[in-house]
Amino acid sequence: MHHTNYCSKSLARVALIAVGALPLYPQEITLASSPTQFGMIGLAAGQTLRLSVVAFPPTPVAPPCIAQLSFANSAGGAVGPGKVVNLNPGQGDFLDLNANALVSQFGQRAEIRPVVTLLPSPAGGPSACQAASELFDNFSGFSLLLVPGTTAFPPAPIFGLQGVALGQLLRLNVVALPTNPCMAQLSFVDKQGNPAGPAPKTVNLSAGQADHLDVSGASLVAQFGQRAEVRPAVAMLPGAAASGCAATAETYDPFAGRTWAWIPPGPSE
C-alpha cells in the first residue's frame, strides 16, 4: 500500500517536471467587447474634439487594434475626417475634428458622436481597442473634457441630480446606437420628482440618429448665482429595443456654445 502510494507520488513529480520542461505558449485570451462606444458630445467654435485609441491590453500576446476612426452628426451622417489605424499592443493614435469646420459663427454648437469601427485582424480574430474622446481649446491647448469609451450603455439610463444656473442650459442627449432604434420620452424632474422645465419630448430615432431636450437655467432660477438641481429622465417606450438609446447629459453656455460638463448615465441596476 505504501509502496504504491510512493510510486504514484513519484510519477506525479516526474509528470510535473516534464510539463515544466515543455515550451510555454500563451493561453487564449478571451476579451470583452472593446470600450469604443460614445454618446453625443457638443463642441463650439474654437474647440477641437479628439478621438484617440490604444491597442489594449498592452501585452505582446494581445490582439492588435485595427479600426476606422470617424465622427457622425445628429442625423447619423459622417462629418469631418476619417482614418484607419493599425496598432500593435501598447501603441496609440488619434483623429481630430475642429469645430471651426462645422459652425459658421461664435455661439453655435455641433453635436457630434465619435465613432470607432473595429476591423478584423488579417491574422484572424477580433481587434482589441480602448478609446477615449477629448475636447480641448484650440488657442490654449487646454483639455476641457475627457470622455472614456464604454462597452455598452445601460438599457434604462438613470441620471443623478445636476445643477444648472442662470446663463446655462442642461441638455439631455440620446442617440440610437447602430442596429438599434431608440424610442423614448425625454424630460426633466426636480429633487422631489416633479416635472421641471419644458414639456416631455418623445423621440423615435433610427440607428445613428440623435435628438435632445434642453432646460434653461433662466426658467428655473430668478437671479445670477442661484442654482437649480434637476434630473434628466429617459423613459423607454413600449417596443423600444433594450439598450437602444445611448443617453448623455451636458451643461453648456448658450452665449459661447461651450460645454462645461458632460455626464454619462449610471447603471440601471
Image (cartoon, helix red, strand yellow):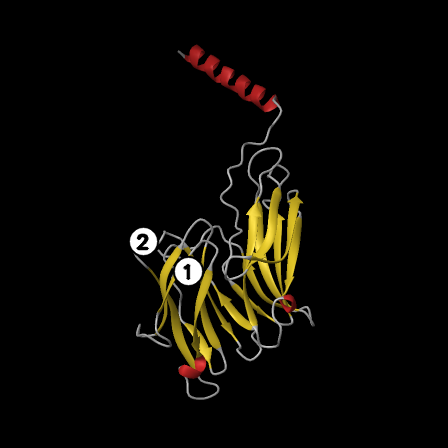
> Foreground: 213 or 225?
213
Q: Could you tell me which secondary element the residue under label 1 belongs to?
A: loop
Determine whether 199 is above or below 267 in the image: below
Q: Residues within 10 Å of mark 2 (few under 14, many from 20)?
A: few
| Screen quadrant of the C terminus | bottom left
> Where residue 226 sits: x, y (%)?
44, 84
Disc assigned to residue 266: 1
> Foreground: 39 or 230?
39
Q: Earlier in the sequence, mark 1 or mark 2?
A: 2
Task: Give the spatial CA distance, label 1 vs label 2.
Answer: 22 Å
Determine whether 180 is above or below 41 in the image: above
> Foreground: 265 or 254?
254
Is residue 173 visible in the rendered image? The answer is: no
Three-letter residue code for mark 1:
Gly
Left/right placement of residue 205 relative to residue 113 reads left
Disc assigned to residue 239: 2
Residues at discs 1 and 2 in contact (Cβ within 8 Å): no
> Where residue 9 sits: x, y (%)?
48, 17
Q: Residues within 10 Å of mark 1 (few under 14, many from 20)?
A: some
Pair 1/2: label in front: 2
Disc assigned to residue 32: none
> Where residue 201 sits: x, y (%)?
37, 68
> Foreground: 190 or 245?
245
How many marks the image carries: the answer is: 2
> Where residue 224 sits: x, y (%)?
48, 87
| Screen quadrant of the N terminus | top left
Determine whether 100 is above or below 269 in the image: below
Three-letter residue code for mark 2:
Gly
Residue at (60% x, 48% y) in the render: 68
Residue at (32% x, 74% y) in the render: 195
Instruction: Name the residue furthest bottom.
Output: 223
Is residue 129 visible in the rendered image? The answer is: yes
